[in-house]
DNA sequence: AAATTAAATTCCGTTGAATGGAACGTAAGG
DNA sequence: CCTTACGTTCCATTCAACGGAATTTAATTT
């Protein structure tokens, strides 16, 4: 009658080994055998064997003096790789290539950096006439589709700081009004805005904590962004950015 | 007759799970089931089960689209803790307390930061008259026991840069000559050097790659550092620093 | 110095957890 | 359409993992 089943426990031994790893926290970085055995409610003999295996693989280290255990360099190494493969760029690249092939236009990935956005990844368009930004280039947040989406999802205080950079009163008024709409629709677009002759659409990328620190954009020459095409592109970037957000661990 | 035994293989299932984690590298951050199964030479059914367990614990993530696996956020989290508990400060603290109780003098931990040393941890001496540096304080590398040990183990190019900071020619000559001796003995000492009335001894802490990025020092008023005591303290810091180095993973 | 306590390690007979081959489902490509 | 490749599910078999008990080691008290 007892439903001891822990939701969905996997392979028992592996599960136990993982439970041990999760015993360690920032507050308790060092644990003795007995402490660990108690935490995972297992006999010390079993725990010793599990720990020995983890130690052989450098996932934990045993201090030969105190006999206490800490998480080991192996985890540090794996964590580093995990961090890398969780980076937006890594995740975004395949999606960006797909969008580029679909739209034949240039696809850019921007990340927020202080009071500007920086292009960190790019898939060049397939047509001779391309819209191009250099990787590493810094652009303002108060103009262009990419800048506007990033801005739209920041705190009011942050937005105020950026508003101070806007050159004319008219632009500022237009921008402020637009941000609301962008948040509602989840996309921004710009035609002949930052540069005459260029158009773009952009959508926000949410990280696991629901913050917007990056965005995806599709851009090209204005004449290829007629209203109907622009509408289609808007849907496309939005879907692309959503796909990336989900892969980053964001659950709406 | 076959000695299939892999050196010392631990619990089979756990070992296999760990082998999976180590399949991922910076070059290959994404792997399919078949790729993983091939790498660890196991049937796909077994591999699936292992991966499922790892996934439930967020040590890997499966991309629902491509069905490929990456290392997960759980490893990122654990790696962060592992990193923290590998930090010199964490490791050093208990050793420092022991030395303080043994010597009754103030024990400091300095780390190299650019062209100076910074005090990052301290155990105050037990006597009314103490030698005190504030945590976070930046001190030069060309004076004081701590500065000199740190300097002694850096590259010649680095040392030259520091030499330029030394105010008088005589001090420079003395310093340059001393570094050699410090490296040989593995300890530095200073009496009325950086501050009149204060004395100190210091020894290098080696990280896992054999580099010296930190040092341990014992310091107090000169009158309590008579030659015989100083000699004893030198042995004490040296042993303390060695203990820390070993816990950091340094093997001489 | 002996006695007591607590923690870590080793041993070994028992059992069910993990295994892997085969069958099944699904998607891509010729 | 058939073929190929990949991922998933099933189930009877077996040996790997288990845990209670015995042993060793270290620290603490009497």
Image: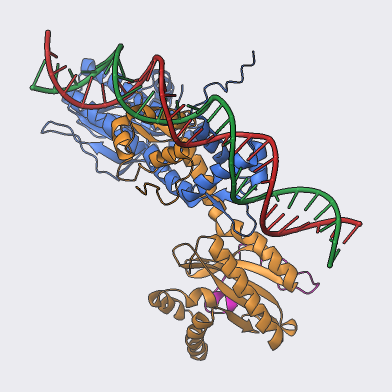
Chain colours: A blue, B orange, C green, D red
In the figure, residue A87 lies in which quadrant? Answer: top left
Residue A69 in sight? yes
Q: Is residue B214 left or right of residue D21?
A: left
Question: A14 or A224: nearer the eye?
Answer: A14
Question: Residue C5, percent across and down?
Answer: 81, 49
Residue occupying image coordinates x 49% and y 47%? A59
In the figure, residue B159 lies in which quadrant? Answer: bottom left
Question: Residue B143, percent across and down?
Answer: 56, 79
Height in image: A11 above or below B147? above
Height in image: B252 above or below A146? below
Which region is colored magenta?
B124-147
Residue occupying image coordinates x 75% and y 82%? B224
Height in image: D3 above or below A144? above
Residue B137: in magenta span:
yes
Residue B236: in magenta span:
no
The residue at the far bottom in this view is: B170
């Amino acid at each position: 009658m007892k439903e001891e089943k822990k939701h969905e426990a996997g392979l028992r031994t592996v599960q136990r080994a993982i439970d041990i790893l999760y015993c360690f926290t920032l507050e308790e970085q060092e644990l003795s055998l007995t402490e660990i055995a108690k935490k995972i409610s297992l006999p010390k003999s079993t725990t010793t064997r599990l720990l020995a295996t983890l130690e052989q693989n450098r996932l934990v280290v045993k201090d030969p003096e105190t006999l206490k255990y800490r998480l080991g360099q192996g985890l540090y190494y794996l964590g580093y790789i995990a961090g890398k493969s969780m980076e937006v760029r890594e995740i975004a690249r395949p999606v960006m290539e797909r969008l580029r092939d679909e739209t034949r236009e240039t696809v850019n990935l921007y990340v927020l950096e202080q009071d500007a956005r920086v292009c960190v990844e790019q898939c060049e368009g397939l047509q001779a006439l391309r819209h191009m930004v250099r990787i590493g280039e810094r652009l303002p947040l108060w103009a262009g589709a990419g800048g506007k989406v990033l801005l739209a999802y920041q705190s009011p205080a942050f937005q105020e700081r950026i508003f101070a950079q806007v050159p004319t009163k008219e632009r500022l008024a237009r921008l402020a009004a637009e941000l609301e709409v962008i948040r509602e629709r989840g996309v921004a677009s710009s035609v002949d805005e930052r540069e005459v002759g260029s158009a773009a659409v952009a959508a926000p990328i949410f990280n696991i904590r629901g913050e917007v620190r990056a965005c995806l954009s599709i851009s090209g020459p204005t004449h290829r962004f007629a209203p109907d095409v622009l509408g289609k592109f808007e849907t496309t970037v939005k879907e692309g950015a959503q796909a990336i957000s989900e892969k980053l661990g964001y659950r709406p």
